[in-house]
Amino acid sequence: MGVVYKARDTRLNRLAAIKVLPPAATISQERKLRFFQEARAASALNHPNIITVYEIDRTDGVDFIAMEFVEGKTLDRLIPGRGMRLRDLFKYSVQIADALAAAHGAGIVHRDLKPGNVMVTETGLVKVLDFGLAKLTQPAEVSDTDLTRTMKGPGGGLRTTEGTVLGTAAYMSPEQAEGLEVDTRSDIFSFGLLLYEMVTGHRAFQGASQMSTVAAIIMQEPVPVGEAAPGLPGELERLINRCLRKDRNQRWQAMADVKITLEELKREEDAGRLALGAAKARPLRRPAGWVVALVVVAAAAALLGAWLGGGRGAAGRPAYDLRPLTADSGLTFQPAISPDGTLLAYASDRAGNGVSTCGSGRSPAASPSSSRRRRWTTWSPRFPPTAARSPSARTGTAAGSF
């Protein structure tokens, strides 16, 4: 929430980021006191992955936070549509986990961890933003139970405005969405949502509205990360799944443990020893019958074209000269070429059986035969003395005809 301006500190001659808070965020005096207290606590954190808070003040009726200016891009602008490479994911996530572990050690819960609150410099250095808007887990002098709950409207429902000091709907933990007391394990759930998005390229829970998104976080399970990102290492998949358990007692209990596990996975990945999970093969759809028939016809046509005229004029392939071998006006069938390739024997439904000189187009020898019998042309093993024979002939073979 709020508007951030780039400014220059004229006294120290350095750039700074000035976050101006809208009046709605500071309307309650008690909330302002709690806000100032938590901002002071966050400013005491000294960690390379946590943005430095210089001061929080009020001028001309406007509350503001002066912070370290970081040149870079927010994480949401660096996550590709299909998810990050493992090398980049481990590089950034280890730094985020380290920052959260340090904050938790100081008794601070972030409550608004999301890609837009993580800045990455050109050198790959991560800075977690907005710790000044976090919640103290230690007892506070000013008691304001509303600050430990999601922001409620007059009717008790969630407000529809995106992003408040108490969290962003798509990155809330179930207990945070239900208005229950939160502790460091709430940040672990939000960190799991962050990892899920870094791995898959999309949010784990995304409804049509803020209300439906919150309902999904409370009641539904996300698409398994192993299905959303096939081939993900099994250890990383289990780490994310444990972060996203609805029951906070079943999650990781300390961010320091999550950080150590991520560091181990990063070392394995850097050394090339991290085993990737087996990608689940999608079942192949059986092609329709007409598709198979079409493919067969196309293949047959291609083979016929290659046999009859393929490569005509093409380099390295012979050209074929097609000539008629019979002059019979009827149906000729069952051709058989003589062993020396000079004669063609065939059967005819009109002229009987015949023999033609290959390439001549003439039928020098023919013998009538009954059309009721099926004719099969073969050449005698005693060729050339005997020309051809037909199994329908009663007398073995006849020279020149059958």
Image (cartoon, grey):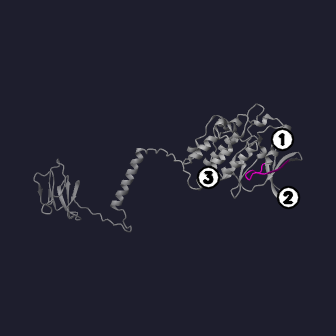
Q: Position of residue 378 (x, y in %)?
A: 18, 56
Q: Earlier in the sequence, mark 1 or mark 2?
A: 2
Which residue position holds label 3?
A: 266
Residue at far top of view: 155
Q: Quadrant of residue 72?
A: bottom right
Q: Is residue 332 magenta?
A: no
Disc 1 marks which amino acid? Thr
Q: Earlier in the sequence, mark 1 or mark 3?
A: 1
Q: Could you say whether the residue bearing mark 1 is in a helix, strand or loop? A: helix
Left or right of 320: which side holds 356?
left
Disc 3 marks which amino acid? Lys
Circle 1/circle 2 CB separation < 8 Å: no
Q: Earlier in the sequence, mark 2 or mark 3?
A: 2
Residue at horizontal 71 percent and vertical 45 percent from the top: 113
Numbered badge on residue 26 = 1
Q: Could you say whether the residue bearing mark 3 is in a helix, strand or loop? A: helix
Q: Compute the Cα span from label 1 to label 2.
A: 29 Å
The magenta stretch spans which residues? Answer: 45-56
Q: Is residue 54 magenta?
A: yes
For residue 402, above or below residue 258:
below
Which residue position holds label 2?
A: 12
